[in-house]
Amino acid sequence: MIRLSDIVVKFGDFEALHNINIHVKEGEFFTFLGPSGCGKTTTLRTITGFIDPVSGTVEMQGRDITHVPIEKRNIGIVFQSYALFPTMTVHDNIAFGLKIKKMKKDEIEKKVNDIARKVDLSDEQLKKAVSQLSGGQQQRVAIARALVTEPAIICMDEPLSNLDAKLRVQLRNELKKMQKEFGITTIYVTHDQEEALTLSDRIAVFNKGYIEQIGTPNEVYNHSSTEFVANFIGDINKLQNEIVSKMELDPAKAHYIRLERITVRLKMPNDGLADPPKNSSVFTGVIESQEYYGLFIKYTIQTAGQTLKVVEKNNGVNIYEPGDQVALYIDPADVMSY
């Protein structure tokens, strides 16, 4: 659907993108993820035509569009700021692209009404000025305006970042649902790891103008290709010397384990241990602190000369308190080494 081959982008002497290679499949929700300044928005702007690469090609549906003007690429764009016309009505904002295409008035009306229903905008809201709408409603208008021209793909640059946390979660669920209903190929830019893991079919993790890994949410989280990805995606523990030595791991490498991959059990008075997981190394520890989240509990535990963070599902029974002696089980198969 969209293929980037050996894309290099420079701003003066600064090379912002270094040989970027990406293939986004038709109907896929593909996310560019990374910290600020890593190259994800620059890559998006190269796809949409706002930036010309110094080398490499951008192909869409097998056609080279590297130097095709923005308006001829058939790509819908939702900007971080939404870029709506605040004094125009919602209806006229959505219809803007259709009017530019000089479509007939009755056809414009039908398309605007159809897309408004699909993104849950009422007839009453269509008559309002955009400035009268909430942030969430404005986001729906921006999406409707991008989709109404029936683009081949839609590109979204941090479209939820201006919303409060609760609304952001609500709208990202709606966004995924809409994307599946429309079946439209979507390229999404975000710095929010949770957002990327929740929404994406696949993720490209960017770092300093390079791509560190491309994979499914499960692959980038549980099978991180590089030390950068392991640290950037979610929370993680770096294992120190005593644990590395006891587990007979390579001392020349850095070793990491996700919080939920460590099993905690209460150390019994007779040193007997309940339900020991197979193939695991066992360490004795002391609960230092506890964070209660409802669905799960996060513990900070002192063990083997270091502090480990562990997340346990909250079953309402095995809840450990500061000072409790516990046993920790670590399976070598769960350790990621670099």
Image: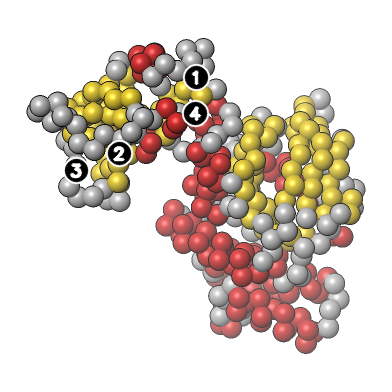
Q: Is residue 170 above or below residue 332?
A: below
Question: Label 3: which residue?
Answer: 318
Contact, mark 3 vs mark 1 (Cβ under 8 Å) = no
Question: Label 2: which residue?
Answer: 298
The image quadrant of residue 265 is top left
Of badges 1 and 2, the one in the foreground is 1
Q: Is residue 141 above or below residue 24?
A: below
Q: Nearer the viewer, residue 176 or 42?
A: 176
Please give the name of the residue rendered at 76% of the width and 65% of the height, measured from the top-left corner.
Answer: 151
Spatial CA distance of label 1 from label 4 is 8 Å
| Kind of residue indicated by mark 4 | Met
Q: Is residue 253 above or below residue 330?
A: above
Q: Position of residue 178 (x, y in %)?
A: 59, 67
Label 1 vs 2, first from the N-terminus: 1
Instruction: Specify the farthest residue to the front.
Output: 278
Spatial CA distance of label 1 from label 2 is 24 Å
Q: Which mark is residue 336?
A: 4
> Dot 4: within a 10 Å radius of its alpha carbon, few (fewer than 14), some, or many (20 or more) residues?
many
Label 3 vs 1, first from the N-terminus: 1
